[in-house]
């Protein structure tokens, strides 16, 4: 029997292409989706399809030279979708991140409903569909990821009815009163119904989606119980599930307990010039609540003067969408807040807020997690948030406190061990920081054991298994290890067979 292959499709490849000194080079990409799916794609003989980040045409020779070696190293084949500058402006910066992203994060006031964005969104998705159709075969498992590619399933089905694609939304799905504000609301819902399985992070997201379906498809029939249900609209039938994403717990736990990371974590503690430090790690985005976190910390310093000089905040901000004006404004707001806090509370030997703007290597990030007394996650809305899980995984047997926004998807899973806060309530954030700092060591360890046990039990591999079982009735082990497929059909190692 023919082996089933995995075909992962996302907006970006786990490697980005750029031109340096007139030469095309590849750099590893990072992010929650890459960290989650790379371990499960390795040596499964499958593909990862996405935009590589380059706006210029790339020849097959360039693909062989750059993506070929990266594919061999990663254990799966990388296939690029070529997007023009106009595509990026209307599809990525436009509809994806100026309409869907803010709307799905309950920040509708930030939406720009420019009608031209929709056509660009569809046009770019058609480019993705052409690459998928060139490589997909009947029986393959096509896994489409996130809000950028909602129309893709319908486009694939229209060209090859035998192909079946499943979809996972990594961001929240909004409530009906917010979703209704989008001009293309019916089209988006209809496109999602063409997948054989639609997965969400939480039961709340699934419920919001089904509530919206009922408005536009009054004949909707829902059957089944539990995390996965079946939805039927006239002749179409598909599955809908709530499957929270996770991390490679063993990998992070092992890294956090390594000798080099522990040594570096001690160095970081000494560099702080405070007894302990709180850690914030976020991509630059207004949904992450970084200004709210800073205001909460500022309020903490005001409310608890006796704890000044005993604890500092280390905020890591990873650059994102730097060409978008709103993100530059957010960066300036963060810099101004940090300047004000440090200007008001710094002493000759102590600085309240340290911050780093830029990407951080995985070992360095693990050291920051390991050395931190507390992780402060203040998302205004998050599909899941993997930072809080990475923090717990890297702590090992050490005590640690997780202060977590109740608006993060992870709050449902981690509620028993974390201190949940409303990030809009600066007094609540300040009290949570004080409670975490003053908490008994025994209680800190008890809570951290609960958190680590929960994350270890529901790691990324269980998430993938759950997704595969729900969507195609298979386990990950049923996608056997095999050689990496050639770049194009009919080619083997770049040569004609």
Image (cartoon, rainbow, N blue to C red):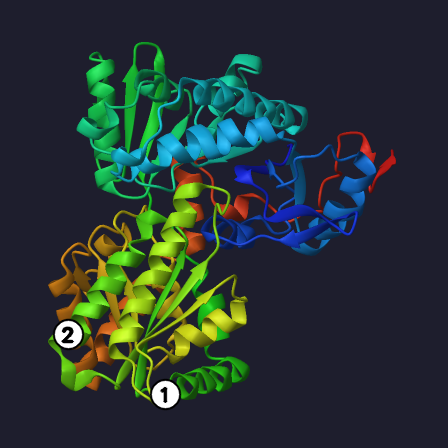
**How many numbered marks are there?**
2
Q: Secondary structure at mark 2?
A: helix
Q: Is residue 153 above or below residue 281?
A: above
Q: Residues within 10 Å of mark 2 (few under 14, many from 20)?
A: some
Q: Residue placed at 53% from the left, 48% from the top?
A: 477
Q: Is residue 431 above or below residue 237?
A: below
The label nearer to you, 2 versus 1, is: 2
Classify residue 49 as left or right of residue 476: right
**Residue 37 screen position, x and y as percent:** 51, 49
Residue 148 visible to the viewer: yes
**Residue 25 screen position, x and y as percent:** 73, 50
Q: Indicate which disc residue 373 carries.
A: none
Q: Secondary structure at mark 1?
A: loop
> In this view of the protein, which residue sits in the foreground, 480 or 489?
489
Q: Residue placed at 54% from the left, 18% from the top?
A: 162
Q: Earlier in the sequence, mark 2 or mark 1?
A: 1
Q: Residues within 10 Å of mark 1 (few under 14, many from 20)?
A: some
**Residue 268 screen position, x and y as percent:** 44, 82
Classify residue 21 as left or right of residue 372: right
Q: Indicate which disc residue 302 carries.
A: 2
Disc 2 and disc 1: Cα gap in Å? Answer: 20 Å
User: In the rendered image, which quarter contains the N terminus?
Assistant: top right
Q: Residue placed at 53% from the left, 24% from the top?
A: 125
**Residue 156 screen position, x and y as percent:** 54, 20
Residue 384 visible to the viewer: no
Classify residue 431 as left or right of residue 294: left
Q: Is residue 62 above or below residue 481?
A: above
Residue under pointer 1: 273
Q: Is residue 450 above or below residue 14?
A: below
> In this view of the protein, which residue sits in the foreground, 196 or 154?
154
Classify residue 60 as left or right of residue 142: right
């Amino acid at each position: 029997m023919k082996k089933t292959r995995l075909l992962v499709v996302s907006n970006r490849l786990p490697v980005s292409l750029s031109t340096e000194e007139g030469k095309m080079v590849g750099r590893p990409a990072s992010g929650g989706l890459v960290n989650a799916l790379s371990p499960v794609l390795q040596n499964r003989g499958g593909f990862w399809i996405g935009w590589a980040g380059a706006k210029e045409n790339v020849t097959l020779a360039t693909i062989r030279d750059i993506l070929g070696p990266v594919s061999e190293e990663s254990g799966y084949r990388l296939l690029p979708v070529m997007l023009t500058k106009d595509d990026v402006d209307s599809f990525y910066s436009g509809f994806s991140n100026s309409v869907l992203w803010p709307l799905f994060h309950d920040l509708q006031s930030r939406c720009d409903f420019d009608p031209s964005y929709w056509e660009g969104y569809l046009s770019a998705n058609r480019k993705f569909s052409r690459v998928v159709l060139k490589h997909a075969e009947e029986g393959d498992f096509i896994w489409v990821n996130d809000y950028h590619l909602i129309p893709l399933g319908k486009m694939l089905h229209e060209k090859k009815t035998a192909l079946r694609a499943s979809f996972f939304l990594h961001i929240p799905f909004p409530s009906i009163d917010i979703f209704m504000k989008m001009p293309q609301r019916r089209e988006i819902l209809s496109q999602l119904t063409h997948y054989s399985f639609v997965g969400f992070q939480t039961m709340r997201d699934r419920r919001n989606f089904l509530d919206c379906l009922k408005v536009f498809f009054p004949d909707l029939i829902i059957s089944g119980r539990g995390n996965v249900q079946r939805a039927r609209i006239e002749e179409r039938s598909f599955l809908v599930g709530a499957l929270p994403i996770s991390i490679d717990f063993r990998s992070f736990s092992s890294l956090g307990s390594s000798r080099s990371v522990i040594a570096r974590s001690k160095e970081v503690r000494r560099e702080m010039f405070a007894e302990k430090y709180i850690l914030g790690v976020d991509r630059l985005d207004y949904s992450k609540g970084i200004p709210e976190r800073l205001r909460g910390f500022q309020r903490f310093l005001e409310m608890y003067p006796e704890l000044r000089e005993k604890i500092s905040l280390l905020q890591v901000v990873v650059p994102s969408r730097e060409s978008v004006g709103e993100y530059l404004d957010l960066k300036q707001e963060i810099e101004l807040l940090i300047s004000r806090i440090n200007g008001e509370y710094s002493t000759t030997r102590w600085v309240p807020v340290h911050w780093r703007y830029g990407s951080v290597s995985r070992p360095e990030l693990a050291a920051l997690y390991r050395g931190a007394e507390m992780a402060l996650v203040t998302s205004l809305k998050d599909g899941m948030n993997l930072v809080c899980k990475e923090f717990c995984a890297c702590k090992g047997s050490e005590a640690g406190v997780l202060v977590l926004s109740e608006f993060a998807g992870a709050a449902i899973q981690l509620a028993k061990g974390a201190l949940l806060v409303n990030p809009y309530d600066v007094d609540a954030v300040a009290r949570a920081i004080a409670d975490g700092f003053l908490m008994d060591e025994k209680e800190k360890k008890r809570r951290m054991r609960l958190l680590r046990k929960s994350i270890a039990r529901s790691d990324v591999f269980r998430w993938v298994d759950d997704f595969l079982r729900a969507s195609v009735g298979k386990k990950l082990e049923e996608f056997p290890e095999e050689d990496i497929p050639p770049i194009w059909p009919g080619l083997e190692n770049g040569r004609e067979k």
